[in-house]
Amino acid sequence: MISVEGRVRTWMMTYPVLVSAWIVLSLLIAPQLSPHLEPGFLAIGLGLAFALSLGWWDETHLPAGSSEDGAWRRFLNLTIVAASWVFLATAVGTGPQHDYLLHQEFWQVVLDGQDPWYLANTYWGYHPPNAYGPLFNPLALLMYVNRLAPKLLFAMAYIVSATALIKRLAGNRSISWPAFLGLMFWAWNPFAWVEVAIRGHFDILVGLASVAAVHFARERRDRPCAIALAAGVLLKYIPIVLLPFLALDRGKIKAKFTAMSTGLIALGLGLSCLIWGKSTFYPLRFAATRSSSYLSIFRFLRGRYSPIWRLGIEPDVEWLATPLMALALLGAWWWCRSRQVDPATGGFLSILVTLLLYRNGFPQYQMVLIMVASYWVAELWNTRRHQTALAIALVGYFGWINAFALAYYQLGDSSTRFEDAVGLPTFLLGGILLVCLLRSELSSENTKIY
């Protein structure tokens, strides 16, 4: 086993060599890369540290295997390292794009000591510029390192999550080539390249926090679960829907966990109020009142293809979004309580129901669902029946989300016809996934396993 000191020495000897090669490439061979010189230094350091950490992961987390398993692990690690370096290179090479340009503006406002939720006339009316939680603001400190440092943090967060999924499913045993290719495509899907590596959305951090909360809930570790959940909520408010589901323990409500989670969230909001005042709560109103968009079924229902137009009335149904979502979540929670389901199932179900009926259908929100669904597959797949139908539903829904991400990347916000239509297939495929998930859970012999 290589010691920590040995890995640090290796990093210190290798890093200057790679940096020198990057300087020569950027300044002499391919001058078009010179604007990315400094963030390249950071990406090289992160990629090298990650590559050296994979051996430590195997030594500490995986059981000793045969020589064949050792060869498989080396091949797997080499594949992961290659994908991670290309992922980091994409994050650097594409620079600031899409919402990341806005992120930089928001962080600069924070660094200038101004109110990050200042009110202004926007596309949605007189609102703050974003609906983010207060924990988004400290990410501004990374701008002192480099303006792409936050984006590289998001990229590394995804690399770690993809690696954990691969290691969990294939880390200590060889699998067939079709299974390997399918796993690699799932882990390094186009959606992640567009939303994280290219556009630099921070929803990956929200997804990781949500997965951590679900994981700790399964282990009945209430304190770290509450911390992870609070972190996700304070980054972006969507994970709040996990709280009542993770508060269930064999059908009973964990009052201590509920109080702890609520207290941590309130503490974060209170500290934010001390720093930025009552504007802390502006994003909540903004998220609840802005008009529907893209993948939301309510965007489809108010668009040109809505069947409501054929009735001769204006399709004003967005006011139904919040009460319908609340009722659906209540029903899902009651079902989870009566069935005493695994917290991973409750987490999967709560996020899926939320995104099906949420009026804001921005594609980056799907990252939380992808993360939680991947964790569910890794931990519970082998305990479920009706796997074929559920597999088809998973591939259908997330295949559509990936196809949409690629199409949206090409079209941008220029096609209103595209935006008018995409909410319907998202809702239908999501509904099929929901039915298949419930059917699989109902027929499972191991529903009450945690």
Image (cartoon, rainbow, N blue to C red):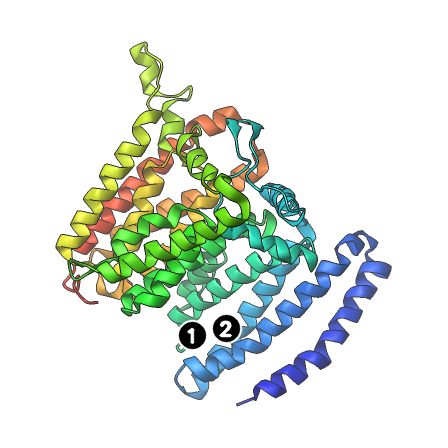
Picture coordinates of residue 385, whole percent (x, y)? 20, 59
- Answer with the quarter of the image where residue 178 lies: bottom left
Q: Is residue 271 left or right of residue 141?
A: left
Picture coordinates of residue 68, whole percent (x, y)? 44, 84
Given the current orientation, which residue lies at the most extreme right position? 28
Q: Helix, strand or loop at disc 1?
A: loop
Picture coordinates of residue 209, whole percent (x, y)? 42, 59
Label 1, residues with CA under 10 Å away: few <14, some 14-19, many ≥20: many
Position of residue 228 relative to residue 367, above or below, is below
Q: Amino acid at mark 1?
A: Gly
Label 2, residues with CA under 10 Å away: few <14, some 14-19, many ≥20: many
Badge 1 vs badge 2, beta-carbon distance below 8 Å: yes
Q: Which residue bears the numbered disc 1?
A: 171
Position of residue 88 relative to residue 237, above or below, is below
Q: Is residue 248 visible?
A: yes
Q: Residue 308 versus residue 30: which sits nearer the camera? A: 308
Picture coordinates of residue 251, whole percent (x, y)? 15, 58
Q: What residue is rendered at 47% in x and 62% in y?
A: 184
Q: Residue 32 versus residue 298: which sits nearer the camera? A: 298
Q: Is residue 146 left or right of residue 288?
A: right
Q: Which residue bears the numbered disc 2?
A: 76
Given the current orientation, which residue lies at the most extreme top position? 312
Q: What residue is rendered at 55% in x and 36% in y?
A: 129
Q: Amino acid at mark 2?
A: Leu
Q: Is residue 370 visible?
A: no
Numbered badge on residue 398: none
Q: Residue 129 versus residue 325: which sits nearer the camera? A: 129
Given the current orientation, which residue lies at the most extreme front position? 274
Q: Helix, strand or loop at disc 2?
A: helix
Q: Is residue 50 left or right of residue 209?
A: right
Q: What residue is rendered at 67% in x and 46% in y?
A: 112
Q: Earlier in the sequence, mark 1 or mark 2?
A: 2
